[in-house]
Image (tube, rainbow, N blue to C red):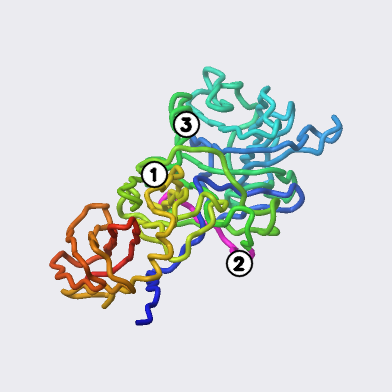
């Protein structure tokens, strides 16, 4: 009797490969992101923070550099005090510039490593000469007062990677741009800087994670990125190549994802992501984390031994598990898998299984998406199995093991 290999594909399909964090690389020429959010105007308190990675010499051109590198900017070009610009300039350090004056840091951040940078404007601290505070990697760099009044205008919304007049292009990668409507303390900055938020945060006006694209992939179909503050803003990508290693989505820094559990259990070769209620994509660690077609369930049953991981996306936060080694499958499991037919699928009450040869013993287990065995039965001297199923609707995995060591796993849907 001729047998066929049953391959079931989820109707939900594949989603784009997702890694722990992504960032956006700016070419230093004309790349920028124009958002539709005006974080705040006037002199209200605020905090701007981001992760950056650059080697550009951002010293003024008169000092042998290439000029300022703008991280974020918004407001109006004139009069003085109407522009709120967070950039790199003197000392290749971060700087707050408000048009007409600025406060510059001392810690150079153009060493090609990821750095968390933040600027805090606190009008209530003018009397103590600490209204502006600049932080690098959670460490206070400098504090001071401006010589002009902060009175941010409303002409141009938040722009990332370029000044609002088109100058000061950023060259390098930017990630996790956040604007808050209060003056964060050093403790708050240090506590939050290594965390990617999965839910709305009090006081978070806008939040761009840059997680939309495929790392160094072909992203030319993307025109916008999403705000993750809960405000439903967007950012328009301008002049990016969106393919290759520059001017495109690239690998970001290593952040901790809140409320996302990236652990995986291995139950006899059946891998289950602990995190529930997310979207999943299983990958082959032995093949450069290549996507495994159709494997988008919480549970994955490899047909061959190897190392596997799962990409998890929960409420906009994305992470990848550690690679899990599967060694419980015998060397002839793949051939055995091709000898099995399960029908019907989806099924209602009877599970039928056909083998292309008779075995002295055949063990059949049905496992739910949490890795729990919900049914188990052994059969003798047979190549056909018919088993009543009375468990609830959902996705299950049928594990078939023989007395000669063959093992295979099939996926079914119970109606």
Q: Residues within 10 Å of mark 3 (few under 14, many from 20)?
A: many
Q: Main secondary structure of the magenta part?
A: loop
Q: Quadrant of residue 82?
A: top right
Q: Does residue 295 appear in the picture of this structure?
A: yes
Label 3: element kind: loop
Q: Are marks 2 and 1 in contact (CB under 8 Å)?
A: no
The residue at which mark 1 appears reads as: 262
Q: Residue at x 69, y 38 (%)?
A: 54
Label 1: element kind: loop
Residue 367 relative to residue 326: left or right: left
Q: Residues within 10 Å of mark 1 (few under 14, many from 20)?
A: some
On screen, residue 133 above or below 408: above
Q: Earlier in the sequence, mark 3 or mark 2?
A: 3
Residue 175 relative to residue 91: left or right: left
Residue stretch rendered in magenta on the structure: 220-230
Q: Earlier in the sequence, mark 2 or mark 1?
A: 2
The residue at which mark 3 appears reads as: 183
Q: Earlier in the sequence, mark 1 or mark 3?
A: 3
- 119 within the magenta span: no
The residue at which mark 2 appears reads as: 221
Q: Nearer the viewer, mark 1 or mark 3?
A: 1
**Real-space Cα separation, disc 2 to disc 1, in angstroms:** 29 Å
């Amino acid at each position: 009797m001729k047998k066929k290999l049953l391959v079931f594909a989820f109707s939900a399909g594949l989603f784009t490969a997702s890694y722990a964090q992504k960032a956006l690389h700016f070419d230093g020429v004309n790349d920028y992101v124009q958002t539709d959010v005006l974080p705040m105007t006037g002199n209200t308190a605020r905090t701007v923070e981001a992760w950056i990675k650059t080697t550009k010499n951002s010293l003024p051109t008169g000092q042998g550099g290439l000029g300022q590198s703008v991280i974020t900017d918004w407001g109006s070009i004139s009069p003085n005090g109407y522009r709120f610009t967070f950039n790199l300039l003197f000392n290749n350090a971060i700087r707050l510039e408000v048009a007409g004056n600025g406060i510059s840091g001392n810690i150079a951040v153009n060493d090609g490593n990821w750095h968390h940078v933040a600027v805090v404007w606190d009008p209530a601290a003018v009397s103590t000469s600490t209204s502006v505070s600049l932080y690098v990697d959670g460490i206070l760099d400098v504090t001071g007062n401006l010589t002009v009044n902060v009175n941010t205008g409303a002409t141009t919304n938040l722009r990332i990677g370029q000044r609002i007049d088109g100058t000061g292009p950023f060259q390098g990668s930017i990630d996790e741009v956040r604007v808050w409507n209060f003056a964060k303390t050093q403790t708050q900055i240090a506590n939050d800087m290594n965390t990617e938020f999965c839910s709305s945060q009090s006081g978070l006006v806008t939040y761009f994670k840059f997680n939309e694209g495929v790392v160094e992939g072909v992203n030319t179909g993307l025109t916008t990125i999403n705000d993750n503050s809960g405000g439903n803003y967007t950012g328009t990508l301008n002049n990016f190549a969106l393919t290759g290693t520059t001017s495109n989505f690239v690998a970001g820094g290593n952040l901790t994802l809140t409320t996302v559990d990236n652990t995986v259990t291995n139950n006899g070769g059946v891998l289950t992501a602990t995190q529930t209620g997310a979207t999943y994509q299983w990958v082959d660690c032995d093949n450069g984390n290549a996507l495994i077609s159709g494997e988008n369930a919480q549970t994955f049953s490899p047909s061959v031994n190897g190392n596997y991981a799962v990409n998890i996306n929960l409420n906009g936060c994305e992470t990848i598990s550690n690679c899990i080694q599967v060694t419980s499958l015998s060397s002839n499991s793949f051939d055995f898998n091709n000898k099995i037919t399960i029908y019907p699928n989806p099924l209602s009450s009877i599970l039928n299984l056909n083998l292309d040869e008779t075995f002295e013993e055949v063990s059949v287990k049905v496992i739910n998406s949490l890795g729990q065995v919900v049914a188990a039965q052994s059969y003798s001297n047979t190549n056909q199995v018919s088993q009543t199923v009375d468990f609830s609707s959902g996705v299950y995995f049928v594990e078939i093991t023989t007395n000669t060591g063959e093992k295979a796993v099939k996926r079914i849907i119970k109606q």
